[in-house]
Amino acid sequence: MYLTIQGIVLRVTDYHDRDALLTLLTSHHGRLTVKARGLRRKNSPLTAPCQLLAYGEFTLFEYRGQYTINEAHTLELFNPLRRDLNKLSLGTYFAQVSEVLSQEDLPNPELQSLLLNSLYALSRLDLPQQQIKAVFELRAACLSGYTPDLFGCHVCGNQNPERFDLSAGHLECGSCRDPESPGIRMPVTGAVLEAMRYISLCDPKKLFSFRVGEQTLRQLSALTEAYLVTQLERGFSTLDFYKSLLNADSAEHRIS
Ligand SMILES: [Zn+2]
């Protein structure tokens, strides 16, 4: 049986001598593992569309629940992103998160669209990386059932609480601390809170259409990252790598 799908390559794993297994994020079939025969052979026609983070159209042959690529065409390679190691590693982190949040045979078109838009933003929009990262992290959490409660302190309803409880996913003021919740709290400013509300509620087409100052962006990105990692109860090797690149950049800055 043949099947044509559009998917983003989340991971490429070597398989046998010259083949590879691809993990794809598709809109109608969720996450899909497919075999790419001869991908590692020189001049394979599959090379371009089967790269990590490529978006393509794949014709698959299905036999007993196993998929093999019959034909593949590139739809978007996000080339500018591939020329910048920091952006490429941030995109790879987005792919790893998407793999964790998606499931086989469970359609999640919103997650696919978020990943596509975030890769597009990294590749073509002149926005700070921290902003794209924060949007992806928080919105991916929301799409996967981890929407935080951002409407005031969960105890007294105060609209300007100072802290966010990472495991409970809600806000509280300093004086309302819930002794029952052992979660780690992070401070939130009004500007950070406003940005979080915007990201979790806005129309998907306007996800990147907000501007905040540098300091707010730093706090926002630290918070969305800590929230996602806390909710998923795991770290990401790709995130560690991205951060190690940033640290190396800033060390180089200090030396020069
Ligand atoms: Zn309160």
Image: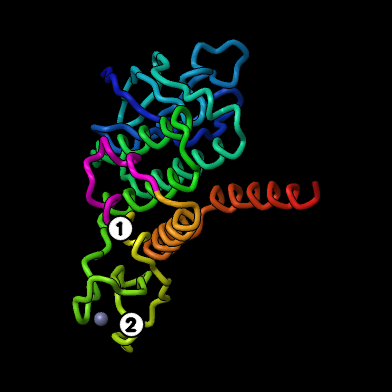
Identity of the residue drawn at 45% across and 55% down? 221
> For the residue with label 2, is its CB less than 8 Å from the closest atom of ligand 1?
no
The N terminus - image quarter: top left
Where 180 falls versus 126 (above or below)? below
Identity of the residue drawn at 49% across and 16% down? 46
Determine the residue located farthest toward the front in the rendered image.
213
* Residue at the spot of label 1: 194
* Residue at the spot of label 2: 181
Q: Is residue 166 left or right of residue 129?
A: left
Q: Which one is in front, 128 or 51?
A: 128
Where 213 falls versus 158 (above or below)? above
Q: Is residue 72 left or right of residue 62?
A: right
Which corner quadrant of the image does residue 19 belong to?
top right
Residue 136 in view of the camera: no
Q: Which one is in front, 148 or 193?
A: 193
In percent of width and height, residue 96 lies at 46, 45
In percent of width and height, residue 50 lies at 48, 23
Where 3 falls versus 167 (above or below)? above
Q: In the rendered structure, which segment of residues is drawn in magenta?
A: 196-211
Determine the residue located farthest toward the right in the rendered image.
255
How far apart are the two marked residues, 1 and 2, measured between alpha carbons?
24 Å
In percent of width and height, residue 88 lies at 55, 35
> Quick check: which quadrant has ligand 1?
bottom left
Label whose residue precedes the other's in the sequence (1 or 2)? 2
Where 208 falls versus 19 (above or below)? below
Q: Which one is in front, 37 or 96?
A: 96
Between marks 1 and 2 in the image, the one whose residue lies nearer the viewer? 1
**Colour scheme shown:** rainbow
**Amino acid type, residue under disc 2 in the picture:** Ser
Element marked by disc 1: helix
Neighbor class of circle 2 (other Cα within 10 Å; few <14, some 14-19, many 20+) is: few
